[in-house]
Amino acid sequence: MSPASERGGGGSLEPASTSARAKADGATPRGSERASASEHGSGAGIEGVPASERAGGAGGATPPGQTIDAHQHFWRYDPAEYGWIDESMTALRRDFLPLDAKRDMDAAAVSTCVAVQARQTLEETDWLLDLADRHAFIAGVVGWVDLQAVDVEAQLERRADRARLVGIRHIVQGERDDFLDRAQFRAGIARLERFDLAYDILVYARQLPAAVRFARAFPGQRFVLDHLGKPDIRHAGFREWRGDIGRLAALPNVCCKLSGLVTEADWRSWTAGQLRPYLDATVESFGPARVMIGSDWPVCTVAATYQEVIDLVRDAVGEYSATEKQQILYGTAQSVYLARKTFPAEEEI
């Protein structure tokens, strides 16, 4: 599948880096190999910055045992709207709705999720918010507004009473590599702090240097890096990615989702040992208070089961303390996305 930047426009989701011949049902049993990120060098930390001033906050590592999946998508499949779902991903050519996710979540002991936009339309954002109002386990929505529009503030105002709107995202990976430097886009980002909304950064690894400049320019804005910045795992792109992730982690207003790795590796042959250095390096760089677990469901299912994706992260953080593990699995997403919100009574249907 060709990158979104080569197809033109910014309307694609998060195309997996894989060969066209990979099949969506090609997941195979994974090994339990281990590899420490310390073997590849440690990243920059943020010593001296109080936890309360970091994007992830100081607390939230309770209640024990709960997991928030910080990255899911829902859609009603339409070939015209989801053209990025090519022949290698035919398993995604159907509707994916909350009750579909809930079955997988229950089996994996995941209690709550955050829904993330997949189409760059206000219509989809409002639809996701309606779903969240009807399903209690969808605790928040990272939606889309046109951050480059002259009326962006009005778009945000019209949704200010929707308590489950917790963040905004633009599919920057589908834009030119200098997109985050655009003055018009940055003007829109500057509006988000007033509405207490996080911003999800979706970029390829080659765009991480621009993401560092971008996040540094808005020290009061909460940022969440999606999918570890999409490292080029299939082509062993660890070293360059490692340096960039360390520089981004040095900014205390940035958190990172431990998500999306299986689709950046070879769909059929990835192993836990191959992915573990990326997870280890990210947790070491950001610290448990600024990383959160995410599945990227249903996109992840082209390469793994939901249970495999959740277990990949749970296993990687298994040697951390109980408090640190619960921060990664629950507390960071709670503090970054949900702690500031007061939710109305919801109806489960």
Image (cartoon, helix red, strand yellow):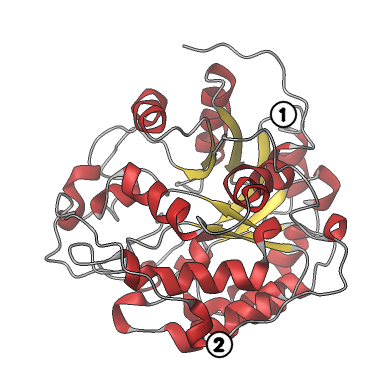
Res. 260 image quadrant: bottom left
Give the residue at mark 1: 163
Mark carried by residue 332: none
User: Which quarter shows the N terminus?
Assistant: bottom left
47 left or right of 87? right
The image quadrant that residue 156 belongs to is top right
Where disc 2 sits, the SS reads loop
- Residue under label 2: 41
In the image, residue 112 sits, relative to residue 198, either above or below, namely: above
Q: What residue is rendered at 19% in x and 55% in y?
A: 29
Are the residues flagged by discs 1 and 2 in contact, CB closer than 8 Å?
no
Query: How many residues crowd mark 1 within 10 Å: few (<14), some (14–19), many (20+)?
Result: some
Marks 1 and 2, how far apart at CA: 41 Å
The residue carrying pointer 2 sits among few (fewer than 14), some (14 to 19) or many (20 or more) residues within 10 Å by Cα, namely: few
Hey, what amino acid is under mark 2? Answer: Gly
Seen in the picture, residue 75 relative to 226 is either above or below; the reply is above
Q: Nearer the viewer, residue 286 or 319?
A: 319
N-term-proximal mark, 1 vs 2: 2
Is residue 71 in view from this perspective? yes
Label 1 or label 2, whichever lies nearer to me, is 2
Where does the image place residue 340, in percent across and percent down from the top left? 80, 37
Residue 206, position in %: x, y? 49, 81
Dot 1: element = loop
Out of 289 and 25, give the one closest to the viewer.
289
- Residues 92 and 296: in front is 296
Residue type at the position of mark 1: Ala
Q: Residue at x 70, y 28 (%)?
A: 162
- x and y percent of residue 322 in the render? 62, 48
Q: Is residue 211 left or right of residue 124?
A: right
**Residue 208 quadrant:** bottom right
263 or 11, nearer to the observer: 263
